[in-house]
Image (spheres, helix red, strand yellow):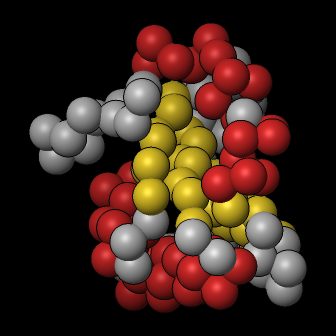
Amino acid sequence: MKKAVVDALEDIKALDITVLDVSKLTSITSCMIIASATSTRHAKSLAHNVQVKLRENGIAPTGVEGEQEGEWVLVDLGDIVVHIMLQNTRDYYNLEQLWGAAEGRRLTLAGKQPAA
């Protein structure tokens, strides 16, 4: 499922995709995928593409938040929570630092190095 989400984000040119394993830090989810969008329209398109691609694989999101505004769109897939943010929003909330204990457990998908 992680690869399907990352592929859906890459299809529409998401920036700085980061995959964090947070399974040892919270019981809410096991993985967070964070990506940047260039505009609110781009963020909405990314979130829509993630939903479409996952539905094609038989997985429906548990919930979607922030889609109307588009500054920070959250797609809850249960075991995976996807955060799509404008860069200034991402810089402000800095989820990577918030979940800093997960830094050492960033995942590599398809041989690609995670974003720094």
For residue 4, above or below residue 107:
below
Residue located at (73% from left, 52% from top): 88
Q: Is residue 14 left or right of residue 97?
A: left
Give residue 114's position: percent from left, percent from top: 34, 35
Horizontal side, residue 43 vs residue 3: left or right: right
- Residue nearest the viewer, comparing 18 with 36: 36
What residue sits 48% from the left and 83% below the top? Answer: 49
Q: Quadrant of residue 60?
A: bottom right
The image quarter in which residue 111 lies: top left
Q: Could you say which quadrant of the image residue 66 lies in?
A: bottom right
Relative horizontal placement of residue 42, taking residue 95 as reference (left or right): left
Residue 83 visible in the picture: no
Q: Is residue 21 above or below residue 65?
A: above
Q: Quadrant of the N terminus?
A: bottom left
Residue 65 lies, in percent from the top left, at: 83, 71
Residue 55: image x %, image y %?
Answer: 48, 84
Residue 63 position, x and y percent, is: 77, 71
Is residue 71 visible from the viewing direction of this image?
Answer: yes
Residue at point 46% right, 40% down?
Answer: 19
* Location of the C terminus (image quadrant): top left
116 to 48, vertically: above or below: above
Residue at the (51%, 33%) spot, across then down:
20
Residue 46 or residue 57, whichever sits in front: 46
Figure check: 30 above or below 105: below
Furthest residue in direction left, as rendered: 111
